[in-house]
Structure formats: structure tokens, C-alpha cells
Amino acid sequence: MSRHRHQPEPGDLIEIKRSGYQHWALYLGDGYVVHLTSADEGIQCLSGSSDPTLRKKAKVKKQLLKEVVGTDDWEVNNKYDHSYTPLPVEEIIKRAESYIGMEMTYRVFRKNCEHFVTMLRYGKSVSDQENIFS
């Protein structure tokens, strides 16, 4: 069963702890998140075995948090709030909803799922995940 620290609020960043990597989503409210996932249903957003030089197609999806998390652990992790000011919640949600269904280019170092959700929350793409591959 998945575990988490507390109930998310709209606009919160959700860190999902997968085996060997983290997947990121943005909480919309009413149990839903928006996240960047592979356009190929069989591939997750980021994996430790991914070739960081390859470009892949990704799709922005709105799904129930419990469906995205499955049995993995997750937590609210607005870890960049100390460095960046979050946009107003209404703007975060509006921005997130405007991307639902869009296809985007995915790259481990420049355009991963964490970059996507931080762009929605702060207006700036940020990710520490690239350090995994350094």
C-alpha cells in the first residue's frame, strides 16, 4: 500500500518513489494529478536505464493520483519553495490543465517529468534528477 506524509493541496508537487528513480506529478485537486508520461504506454517517464541522449515523445495526462502511484510510496515535495516563489494556485491549475493531452519532447536532462511540473508551479523548469546520471 502506498504511504504519504499528508494530503496534497492543489498546486503541490507530488514525488512518487519508483524503483531506482522518482516520477513527478502536480496535484490538481479532487484526487487528480497532471503528469508527463511516455506517449508509449509501456514506458515510464524516467528510468535509471534510460539513455539520456535520446529524445522521446511524452504525453501530458490527467489521472487519479492513486492510479499513477499504484503501490509505490509518494509524498508532497515542494522542495524548491525555498528558492522559487510558487505562482498563484489558480494560475498553476490553469497552466496545468492547458497542457492535458499535449505531446511533448522528453529528455532526461532537459525536459523530464520534474522539469514539467516545476515549470507549472514556479514558471521555471528545475530538476535534480539529472544528478543520478552524473
Image (cartoon, rainbow, N blue to C red):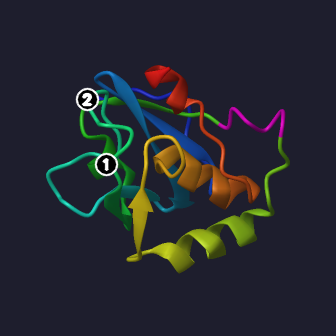
* Front residue of 48 and 31: 48
Residue 13 inside the magenta-drawn segment: no
Residue 70 appears in which quarter of the rendering?
Answer: top left
Residue 51 appears in which quarter of the rendering?
Answer: top left
Residue furthest to the front: 53
Residue furthest to the left: 42
Q: Residue at x 73, y 36 (%)?
A: 80
Bounds of the magenta segment: 78-83
Q: Residue at x 64, y 60 (%)?
A: 120
Amino acid at the residue labelled 2: Ser
Q: Residue at x 60, y 38 (%)?
A: 127
Q: Residue at x 50, y 74 (%)?
A: 99
- Looking at the rendered structure, the secondary structure element under dot 1 is helix
Instruction: Name the image quarter holding the N terminus.
Output: top left
Side (left or right) of 36 relative to 77: left
Amino acid at the residue labelled 1: Val
Side (left or right) of 49 relative to 83: left
Residue 49: assigned label = 2
Relative height, residue 30 to residue 78 (above, below): below
* Magenta residues, dominant SS class: loop
Task: State yes or no: discs 1 and 2 in contact (Cβ < 8 Å).
Answer: no
Q: Which residue is mark 1?
A: 68
Residue 81 inside the magenta-drawn segment: yes
Q: Residues within 10 Å of mark 2 (few under 14, many from 20)?
A: few
- Looking at the rendered structure, the secondary structure element under dot 2 is loop
Look at the image and tell me whether residue 32 can be seen.
no
Between discs 1 and 2, the one toward the N terminus: 2
Return the x and y of residue 72 as percentages of the image width and height.
Answer: 30, 30
**What distance separates the C-alpha of mark 1 from that of mark 2?**
20 Å
